Amino acid sequence: QVQLVESGGGLVQPGGSLRLSCAASGSIFSINTMGWYRQAPGNPREMVARITSGFDTNYADSVQGRFTISRDNAKNTIDLQMNSLRPEDTAVYYCHADLWVYSGSSQRFLGVWGQGTLVTVSS
């Protein structure tokens, strides 16, 4: 059993900042890429930022220069620092991980989602 738990969402005014955190726990052998996705009402889920185990990152064009993703491999956590927030950043933000879990005497590859945390940018 593996789970991802997000925290840090909330209400913020335009131009403000928030920091999201995600922690992976369970029978984890190793974690490949972790990332943040978001889904606004009526829209499909979209990638926001991703980070590999080697700390390579990529960002959606809409957040480049405003958001920063970071990772602690020892703690199996990622953070998303969001600055200069805009109303269009309002969405439920989901953490995702591609990881290997222990399965009997071997490992199994899974893609796991967190439950989501709501970010609302409004005055």
Image (cartoon, helix red, strand yellow):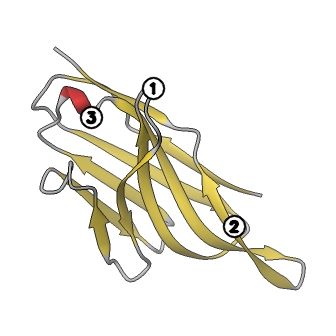
Query: What x and y, as percent, mark residue 84?
Result: 11, 39
Residue at image location 48% in from the left, 74% down from the top: 74
Mark 2 secondary-structure assignment: strand
Query: Which one is earlier in the sequence, the residue at label 2 or at label 3?
Result: 3
Callout count? 3
SS at badge 1: loop
Three-letter code, disc 2: Leu
Alpha-carbon span between mark 2 and mark 1: 27 Å
Q: Nearer the viewer, residue 13 or 87?
A: 87
Q: Residue at x 14, y 32 (%)?
A: 16
Q: Which mark is residue 42?
A: 1
At which x and y percent is residue 55? 34, 77
Within-10-Å neighbours for mark 1: few <14, some 14–19, many 20+: few
Percent x, y for residue 36? Answer: 41, 52
Q: 17 above or below 80?
A: above
Residue 19 occupies quadrant: top left
107 lies left or right of 22? right
Residue at x-position 83% and y-position 85%: 106
Q: Which residue is mark 2?
A: 110
Q: Is 73 on the left or on the right of 80, as rendered?
A: right
Q: Which residue is rendered at x = 69% and y = 67% of the image?
A: 110
* As drawn, 37 above or below 85: below
Q: Is 9 situated left or right of 112 in this image? A: left
